[in-house]
Image (cartoon, coloured by chain):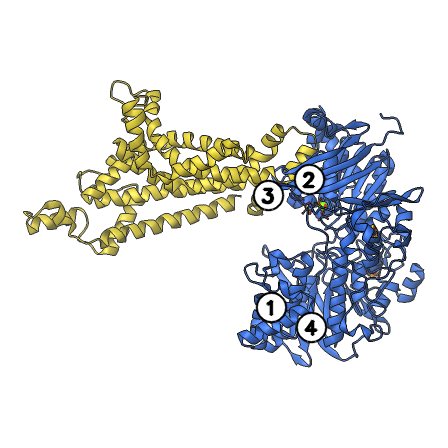
Chain colours: A blue, B yellow
Amino acid sequence: MSATNIPTLELRSLEVAYTVRGIDREVLRDVSFSIAPGEAYGLVGESGCGKSTAAFAAMRYLPRNGKITGGAIFFEGKNIVEMADDEVSGLRRSAISMVYQNPATALNPTIRVGDQVAEVFQLSGVSKSDSLAMAQAALVQVQIADPAQVMRRYAHQLSGGMAQRVVIAMALASNPRLLVMDEPTTGLDATVEAEVLDLVRELRRDTGTAVLFISHNLGVIRNMCDRVGVLYAGALVEQGATADLFNNPSHPYTVGLLRCIPRGGLHKSADRLDTIPGTPPALGTHFDGCVFVDRCALVEDKCRTVQPQMVNVSDSHVARCLNSDKASAMPRSIEQIEYASQSGIHATHNGDTLLSINHLSKVFTQDGHKVQVINDVSFNLGFGETLGLVGESGSGKTTIAKLVLGLVSPEEGGVVTLDGKGLAKTLNRRDVHDVGAMQIVFQNPDQALNRRHSVTRIVGRAVERLRGFNVSDAIDRAHELLSGMRVEASLHSVRPVQLSGGLKQRVAISRAFAGSPQIVVCDEPTSALDVSVQAAILNLLVDLQKQDQTSFIFISHDLGVVRYISDRIAVLYLGRVVEFGTSQRVFNGPFHPYTEALLSSVPNVDGTIRKRIPLTGVVPSPSNPPSGCVLNPRCPRKVGSGYESLCESEEPDLNEVEPGHFMRCHIPVAKLKQLQS
Amino acid sequence: MKQFILKRLGLSVVTVFLVAVIVFFLTHILPGNVARQYLGRGATEEDLAEFRRVFGLDRSLLAQLFGWIGDLLHGDLGQSMQYRGPVSDILLPAIGYSSKLACVAFFLIVPISIAGGVIAAMNRGKKIDRAITVGGLSAAVIPEFVWAIVLVLTVGVTFQIFPVSAFPDEDNRSILNQIWHLILPSISLLLVLFGYIARITRAGVIEALESDYMRTAVLKGMTRRKAVSKHVLRNALLPTIAVIASQIPYLIGGLIAVEIVFNYPGFGTILKGAVDARDYSVLQSGVIVSSLVIVVFQLIADILFAVLNPRIRQKVTE
Ligand SMILES: Nc1ncnc2c1ncn2[C@@H]1O[C@H](COP(=O)(O)OP(=O)(O)OP(=O)(O)O)[C@@H](O)[C@H]1O
Ligand code: SF4
Ligand code: SF4
Ligand SMILES: [Mg+2]
């Protein structure tokens, strides 16, 4: 064991480069930080800033074209950069472990889960039979239900949360003194994420392992870490004790990041979101001065020539900025738009119904079994209104969107009415006007855009098809649309591959608006984007809504985003609407027990500690829904409510519990309110 | 699993049946009066009628087809027109010889090509990788019968390392000596197939080497070597199995060409003789037999693939 004053991990002036087309490109620039034994250190920053590179460097596992060009990495005082391969393998076997994003692919698909966990023990010399017993014990430690049975499964038979538990079990099996976690919960449902984070917190308390915790999610970092470092373009720009850094951010980049996030119950009717103008520099860009010059609101001439050094903000808090004292008061960055002069942004919908869906159900046939994924869903959508759909994965959000769009046809009895006119069930039986009236924007613009066509062509073709324009008019209109979405004219002739994620999403939105739609379905439109880009896209959507009275159906797992952009919200569970009401009502309560649990699982950037209302167990399969209220096996409010037997025998109706606020629960709303206060 | 195998088996039967029908019609639609060709200009009408009766050519096409298929099902391959004896007497020994060659070729080609692919992948971007990939592809450009001739002329005639005939003399027909004689013909097939199989193996291994689970294994502290043998090979070889199976028809085609060059009394040589002599009954049976072989190997490959891949295994057992 090391003496306590020697850090578990220390990066000292670490420089890493990737060789691309024969040229070394700097990825990490003079990065230094250290993690004390038992400490949790968080690393945040936008995509591409070098977080994973730092993590893998700490494991001395860089990609083939990556190399350490300077500095040192000390593990308990020993420089692992200079270690022999055997010695590094030895450390990985006994002292350092890693958990990363995408647990499903981290496991070998052809080897049983138990054998893979057992392998870790075998590597440290345990016999095969003992190792299996130890593997099972390791699975018990990470609180997997039915570990004996999980041992025999293959990776594809595990849910995301279970797979991540297995990976964590594997990482902890060697009793590591340092655990490196790179986005361990990204891609998991909020409820599952909360459980995994709870688990990590508990295990840390029990084992005292030091953790390097990487995430792009500031809320997660705030809740998990003792200290935080902020990376930008491969440079550590700010570092401090978590609360200090979040409460008094002192680098313009950190300030900008925190301002981009819709937080504190912010709603589009109250304010626009801040963005960070510009984009991160290309890989390997050289800077004489500060790395943030191109995007900084406080930039001065000296910033371009002087490399800023870390300055003390407080004893436990440093920032790499020449103007760090002015950072927290830096001017807001809200994109100026033509009609910004109009005072504020107010709710634009006037209450008239544009779309109404009635009694939509959908049954899929899977391996010969009937699976009801949507169960009698009805709601209205007004002109210029945004309806948010939230719920765990598998709750039916995307299927509802597809039903509305006619991409799948509803069961008998389901009706979609647009502007008073009943729509044909499937897309190919709807006329051009109806098709153009409803469009969709997907999560992943890469898959949605034809990579062989230019941006203009992509949008132009949609205009031709949906508006019946001739080619040259369509191209003019495409340019107009793209410019309206703030895609510069110089980019109109390029192909999607040459665009950043945010620009691609703007192109996808332009295409959706080609037919002057009345309704645009947005299915996780910003989930793959950085917060600064997300803010810009959300602002754009709100602007479009204001301009054209467009209505949105907005799907997102990010409750902060949904809360910001939605006028009304439908909370879904197992294909049913369990709560429906204004954004205000749904987020401020009284809550449906499911909504309550969902909201409490979101890690909060503001640092206020909320009591988590756990949802135990996993989402049941829609092929075999529980009897009574579908939530009852997991419901946090059922037990002790006095309604247990009713919950287990009868499915509650969706009742109007307050004007405009609907809930599907046996517990009367007054009682819920009382329980939740 | 049982159901899966039965289903595949059923499909195979249908395939072979269709091949039989197609082959039958193709050979019967071919122009030319079969009887006249065999018996020559001097044959009388009676001779011709007798010939047709013996070979069943006087019946309607459909009757001939079903008669033929019925006979096939009873294991009766019919009468050779050329040799005037049962087709099975001619085909079976030839098939025996060809199987020997195919076995030797298979056991030479598969391990060597897979090893080549694995070595290339493990040394990606290095000289040895380039040598294997480029060499393999270049060798595959040249058809196997050309390779066969080249090999016979070089290592056979000039350097006299390998015997030039594929068939040992009567005084020494020990298994080893037979295999020894079959190596050269196998090498000519190896040269053609190596590049293809090695390339697929290489791609599979590289994909597995770059997979997240390989990373997991290395970060657990496994040495690279051990991680490769435990985590890479099994996953990487899955696609390779499918590819090898898909190359079986090609292998059979190659065998035929090579046998002819080496004058080996196998299936290919007999088939060529049948083509030259327009011996339809031998030709038909030959094609049926080869389609049977192809289908059986495809079946074996499918089952192997499913057994090795838990995702599919699970699906098929459900
Ligand atoms: N093998 C590689 N070769 C070349 N460039 C690379 C390689 N791996 C990563 N990069 C680049 O290096 C930079 C840092 O990448 P890194 O993966 O460390 O970022 P990150 O902060 O983890 O991003 P994310 O949030 O998207 O995971 C990025 O610009 C990325 O495109
Ligand atoms: S040093 Fe200058 S450019 Fe860099 S963050 Fe500070 S004010 Fe901005
Ligand atoms: S009806 Fe019962 S089980 Fe369902 S949400 Fe209400 S309290 Fe929970
Ligand atoms: Mg990363």
Alpha-carbon span between mark 4 and mark 1: 18 Å
Q: Residue at x 19, y 38 (%)?
A: B85
Task: State the image quarter where residue A73 is shown.
Answer: top right
Q: In this rendering, is residue A42 above or below A505? A: above
Image location (x, y in percent) of residue A364: 62, 61
In the image as oriented, which residue stretches furthest toward the bottom? A420
Residues marked 4 and 1, same chain: yes
Alpha-carbon span between mark 3 and mark 2: 13 Å
Res. A21 mark? 3
Alpha-carbon span between mark 2 and mark 4: 47 Å
Q: Which residue is drawn at 58% across and 63% down?
A: A493
Return the residue at label 4. Answer: A519
What element does badge 1 sit on?
helix
Q: Which residue is drawn at 91% across and 48% down?
A: A243
What element does badge 2 sit on?
strand
Instruction: State which chain disc 4 sits on.
Output: A
Q: In this rendering, is residue B21 above or below A338? A: above
